[in-house]
Image: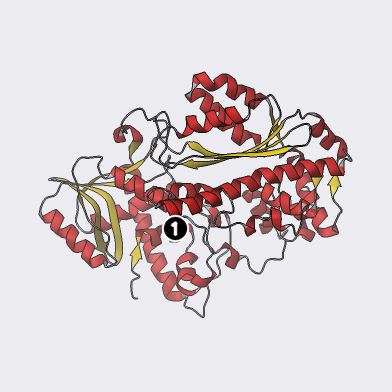
Amino acid sequence: MNKLYLSKSDYCKCVQCEKILWLNKYKSNTSKSENNESIFEKGRQVGDLAKGLFGEYEDIPYDKKHSVRMEKTKKALKNKVNIITEASFIYDNNFCSVDILKNDVDGVEIYEVKSSTKIKDVYVDDASYQYFVLSNLGFNVKKVCIVYINNEYVRYGELDIEQLFNIEDITSVVLEKQAEIRENIDYINDFMERYDEDNEPDSQIGMKCFDPYSCEFWGYCTRNLPKPNVFDVSGMYKSKKFEKYYEGKISFEDLENEKLNPKYLEQIDFELNDREAKIEKEALRSVLDSLNYPLYFIDYETCQYAIPEFEGTKAYQQIPFQYSLHIIKEDGSVEHKEYLAQIDDENIIRNFAESMINDLSENGSVIVYNKGFEAGRNREIGEMYPDLKDEIDRINTNMVDFMVPFKNRNYYTKEMEGSYSIKYVLPALFPDNPELDYDNLDLIHNGGEASEAFLSLKGKILEEQDEIRKCLLKYCELDTFAMVKIWEKFKEVTDG
């Protein structure tokens, strides 16, 4: 049997599902992977920073040819370099690069760096695979550790990387997994030997399709299921969906008489029987009656830094950098205001807050979609800047959440597909309205793309920045314009 050339990422994918390698090899065109560019970039930044944890180091630069990297690693080891980053090794066609290799006189230590804030099982598999390769090459591996982000560390002054990173010794767990790794590698090799392009393995879907990562071949593996099916029931736990799936209750017809949450049954009923819109007028009137002029329709955009950039912030803290604001006064006049930070603004949070407080100067209703998010950011601002807390608390006290009527199903249509996300609600309320279609926007169509676009401004020339900033402003403006349209729809359907 010809041994597979197996990287540590290949190995970890196969621990999740043995079929992934086969799909990558023979059905790669069916892959529907999410754009994880920002995740990869955060990982790269964290990895580069962690290289300095133990002082001076020698880095093995990336090269497509693994042999080049391994040769440079051998040279660094021969020269007795103490700290080697991206050291590369192969044993019996099993290849790995070690993020940080501590090369002492009496043996080596492996440090696997992750941009996460906690240790996941897959990280242990990753590090255990590295131990397997190095120990079988004859290295005395003294210790194996996971290096990960400490999100309790608050930055004040210069970044302290010793406080930013947690280091956890997992050597004992790694040693216990060595026999399992040998068995897994043998199984993977046998699996790929048995199944070729014309002989597709029959691998059942399950929770493994989402743990530890959502599989990019989910669409392919579920292509023959009826549409809609149990996995389209909005809000149901995945474990419950698989429970029903294994019972053979897959289509909506199979599910309509099951004992399920009433909201799930309502989604199924509306889909199967093409029900007319459900509009609970009294509930909507109650929302409208609670509003006080001027009406402030506001939406925030935020970004996250794996490495805290600003004074008083933590890793992965949501940093508000933009808002759009539609103001409707009692006389019916409409005004639009907006704020978009500069990418190099060191006081980005305070400047955002001061601008918002200035624009929301009166005690009108502050209308948002998903109050928990905006109110949460405001509380963080109040904690960071006590002199702004009273004004921030005033804004939070005036906050009204337009998501609630949809979450409570006071207003529901089949087209919402069980969801209360504005990306479902808006086209359901205003079908075929190009003015309210996020797909018609340039470059930015959702909050994730907005965050990525803002972070991408760093280092770009002014012309490129200007183009991206225009797209950011257009996107955020649509979010608040959408809420204005929802308010108008509430008034229309309640004859208010």
> Outermost residue, left direction?
79
> As rendered, which of 20 and 368 lies closer to the eye?
368
> As rendered, which of 396 and 167 lies closer to the eye?
396
**In the rendered structure, which amino acid carries the disc numbered 1?**
Val
> Outermost residue, right direction?
495
**In the rendered image, the vertical position of residue 416 relative to residue 313, given as above or below:** below
From the top left corner, tell me how far across and down residue 402 is, in percent. 72, 38
Question: Quick one: SS at disc 1?
Answer: helix
Which residue does the numbered mark 1 point to in the structure image? Answer: 15
> As rendered, which of 179 and 495 lies closer to the eye?
495
From the top left corner, tell me how far across and down residue 480 is, in percent. 66, 42
Task: Specify whether 147 is left or right of 122.
Answer: left
Task: Specify whether 444 is left or right of 48.
Answer: right
Looking at the rendering, in which quadrant would you find the C terminus? top right
At 33% from the left and 75% from the top, the residue drawn is: 2
Looking at the rendering, in which quadrant would you find the N terminus? bottom left
Can residue 212 be seen by looking at this rendering?
no
**In the rendered image, the vertical position of residue 174 relative to residue 138, given as above or below:** above
Can residue 451 be seen by looking at this rendering?
yes
Label 1: few (<14), some (14–19) or many (≥20) C-alpha neighbours in 10 Å: some
Q: Quadrant of residue 185?
A: bottom left
